[in-house]
Amino acid sequence: MSNMEQEASRVLILLYEEKSLWDSCNDITDGYKKLYESCFEHIEYFTCDSTPDSPAKLNEKIRKNSYNKIIFLDHRIRVPKELYYFVKDKETKKNQFIFHVYGCFINRTEEWRFIRDNLDFCDYNFVAGSLAHKRLVDEVLGTDVLYIPFVVLDSKLESEKQIPNLNIDSKDKVLLYAGRVSPGKNVIALCEIMNTYNESRDKKLHLVVAGSIDDMGGIIGGNDFFPRGTMAYNFAKAITGSKYIHYVPYIENKKLLMSYYKRVDGIISLSTMLYEDFGMSIADGLALGKKIICTNWGGYKEFTKYSDQVISIKVNFSNKNFNVSKEETKEALDKFWEDNHFEIKNPFSVENLRSTVLYEFKKNKNDKIVGKKYLKALKLFRFRDLIKFPMISKLYGSYYD
């Protein structure tokens, strides 16, 4: 096992029959499964479903087996009926409960409060995917959570043999934005910059936008609230007539999507979404050896330590808005043209992250959630109202400082 033994712990991983609607979250789940399989010698799975006897089956399985760790693997903290069923069963005190938290966090405070109030009889902890997100969770919960980056499976990087023909001149370069076309992702601002960037250039820079359109993020990404359908209208207006922006709707065939990653010269994202705890499109691009342009927002900022091919753009917080400078973005595009040749490697492979898992799980984790004032304060507001309060700037300082 590449100079590293599997830990002999007996581990139960809880999955959910209902899959996430977000492809990136399903990728994260699959990646963590493979990572844990490489780290622990004895792993079993239990799939929670909607049948009435699912909680009883899980509780019986836990009582009959001596698991060292019970890992809830999902795209958000979720307190299902299964957890309610056995949380008071003192037989479970011998187990360590691990809850992954990625994607949604601040708007799930009820789940956090339940875990804080009901799991004090056993050992439990949480796993964040980036240091920025870890600091956010630490700040809210007053504890020291674990940190394991998201996995990019080598098998995921396989693509269709035929590379897509984008009808772009071979002397021009191409950037890819892959993900939801949402307000918080700042895709329209990116398109506006691209529409003027090529005006005085001989060699042109093209942008391929690949993803479905929705209105998510206007209320949580530093912008005003977007009524339903607004994003589709504004995005269509931004790209209509452009010679250098190419829109590809949602691609269900993931190998075909990966062929787009391989076809382009770099990956770009100006996102300031509060859900940007890591950034799978950026990680996928790095794993393929592509040059990256991204904000220094959330988990994005950490990619600079994995490669010197990451061009980082500063995000500012002012007037209750997260701002990305158009001037800095254009400077990043200029820098993108510089020729660089570097080795393709996957820093987020199972092999590279295995030691991180074993280190984090062996740390002495005696801290418990103490429930700072934020947990109570957040409960008082609808999530979309948070951006109006100075508290959000303080909480998300780890995302942009």
Image: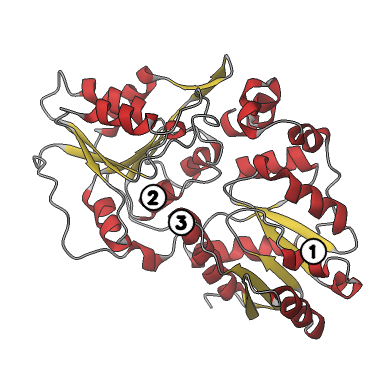
Which quadrant of the structure image shows residue 219? Answer: top right
Q: Secondary structure at mark 3?
A: loop
The residue sitting at 86% across, 44% down in the picture is 370
Cα gap from disc 3 to disc 1, whole angstroms? 38 Å
> What is the three-letter code of the residue carrying label 1?
Tyr
Q: Which residue is mark 3?
A: 347
The residue sitting at 15% across, 18% down in the picture is 200
Residue 231's label in the rendered image is none
The residue sitting at 18% across, 24% down in the picture is 198
The residue sitting at 33% across, 51% down in the picture is 289
> What is the three-letter code of the residue carrying label 3?
Pro
Mark closer to the chain start, 3 or 2: 2
Q: Residues within 10 Å of mark 3 (few under 14, many from 20)?
A: some
Q: In this rendering, is residue 283 above or below 16? A: above
Q: Position of residue 350 (x, y in %)?
A: 50, 66
Q: Residues within 10 Å of mark 2 (few under 14, many from 20)?
A: many
Cα gap from disc 3 to disc 2, whole angstroms? 8 Å
Q: Which residue is mark 2?
A: 286
Q: In this rendering, is residue 189 above or below 353? A: above
Q: Which residue is mark 1?
A: 84
Q: Residues within 10 Å of mark 1 (few under 14, many from 20)?
A: some
| Comparing labels 3 and 1, the label whose residue is closer to the camera | 1
Which quadrant of the structure image shows residue 185? Answer: top left
